[in-house]
Image (cartoon, grey):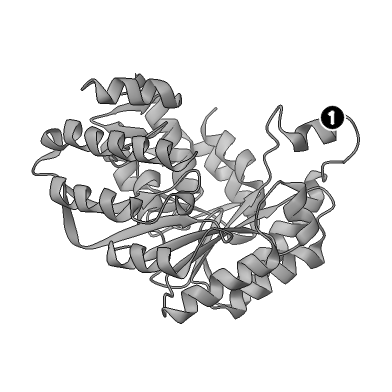
């Protein structure tokens, strides 16, 4: 996107806020998250203009969490100043790995020096509420490479670390290289060993794994993500954004031209919607709860679905307890810490 397209996009975003604002009068928002894609590439002043409009149009709780995603190669001191003045109090940085060869392999623009420079900028402003994204399972990635990245983040006192395993999407350069046998995907056991290594290193450094992919120092858990996992409501604005209001999920078009045309003619850019049925809500509640440290709250589950899980899933629960995979703790079903790598098979037991 050149600057003229960015200006057009900003104008459309401001217009969409106008179209949505009345619907949410009286609602209080607890978090803001600018992300998906790379917000730090837009021109200086874009974010401050956007936030000026948002603050005039919506109401926020007193101590709201405000995250913006950044790429190390496009973060500057000037942009960070703009973010801080706009109310940003949490940065999420796509580090992925410190290994230069792996960064090139996944077509990331940043270099190791970009990552180090970005941390220097954050430190210079005493900005310490930082998340770093890390990817495991990259072709040719080693345990030593993973440990080096984690050690660097711990040393730099990063408060939150999100650890994801590589998803190889069809028709990407990486997918094509694997299909043509230029590269080999890592086997599941190797990736599991990497995850186990990360877990042990972060536990030793006093990070809490509060969700399968998320580790945080106490008090730095991501409120925005917790809202998703609690199946609470959220409003999405902008290209391809998703929302969940009154039991309905709906999402905007991914097509830039269509988005501009619809919004600038005073129409919402909603592409489609789905109403979540009972079974979908139940499945998601079980799946998302078991991924979390607290597990399934049995009282809340019964209130929401009129189902006593200890009775309806008695056999599955007893079997999983005998295998030392779960425990009942303070009226919650919790996956044992040492069994999180078997989470998918545990979840499936509850969905039979």
Percent across and percent down for residue 76 are 48, 66
Outermost residue, left side = 26
| Left or right side of 334 for 101 | right
| Left or right side of 70 for 102 | right
| Left or right side of 54 for 186 | right
Residue bearing the label numbered 1 = 179
Residue at 36% across, 69% down: 81
Residue at 75% across, 35% down: 173
Percent across and percent down for residue 294 are 43, 57
Which picture quadrant has residue 145?
bottom right
| Left or right side of 262 for 4 | right
Residue at 82% across, 60% down: 142
Q: Is residue 169 above or below residue 91?
A: above
Percent across and percent down for residue 284 are 44, 35
Foreground pick, 18 / 66: 18
Foreground pick, 2 / 61: 2
Residue at 74% across, 58% down: 194
Q: Determine crowd level at label 1: few under 14, some 14-19, many 20+ residues with C-alpha closer than 10 A.
A: some
């Amino acid at each position: 996107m050149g600057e003229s397209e960015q200006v057009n996009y900003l104008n459309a975003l401001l217009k969409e806020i106008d179209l949505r604002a009345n619907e949410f009068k009286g609602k209080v928002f607890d978090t803001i998250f600018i992300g998906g894609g790379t917000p730090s590439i837009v021109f200086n002043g874009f974010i401050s203009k956007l936030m000026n409009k948002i603050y005039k149009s919506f109401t926020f709780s007193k101590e709201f969490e405000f995250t913006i995603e950044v790429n190390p190669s496009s973060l500057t001191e000037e942009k960070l100043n703009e973010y801080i003045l706009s109310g940003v109090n949490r940065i999420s940085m796509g580090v992925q790995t410190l290994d230069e060869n792996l960064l090139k392999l996944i077509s990331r623009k940043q270099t190791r020096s970009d990552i180090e420079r970005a941390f220097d900028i954050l430190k210079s402003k005493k900005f310490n509420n930082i998340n770093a994204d890390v990817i495991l399972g990259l072709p040719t990635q080693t345990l030593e490479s993973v440990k080096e990245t984690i050690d660097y983040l711990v040393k730099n006192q990063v408060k939150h670390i999100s650890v994801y395993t590589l998803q190889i999407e069809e028709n990407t350069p990486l997918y094509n290289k694997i299909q043509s046998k230029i590269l080999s995907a890592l086997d599941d056991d190797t990736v599991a060993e990497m995850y186990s290594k990360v877990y042990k290193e972060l536990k030793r450094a006093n990070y809490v794994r509060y969700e399968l992919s998320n580790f945080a120092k106490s008090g730095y858990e991501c409120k925005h993500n917790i809202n998703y996992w609690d199946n609470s409501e959220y409003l999405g604005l902008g290209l391809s954004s998703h929302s969940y209001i009154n039991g309905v999920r709906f999402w905007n078009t991914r097509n830039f031209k269509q988005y501009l045309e619809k919004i600038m003619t005073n129409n919402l850019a909603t592409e489609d919607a789905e109403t979540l049925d009972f079974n979908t809500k139940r499945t998601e509640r079980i799946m998302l709860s078991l991924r979390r440290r607290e597990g399934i709250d049995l009282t809340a589950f019964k209130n929401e679905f009129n189902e006593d899980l200890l009775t309806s899933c008695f056999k599955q629960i007893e079997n999983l307890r005998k295998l030392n995979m779960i425990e009942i703790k303070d009226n919650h079903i919790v996956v044992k810490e040492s069994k999180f790598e078997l989470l998918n098979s545990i979840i499936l037991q509850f969905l039979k």
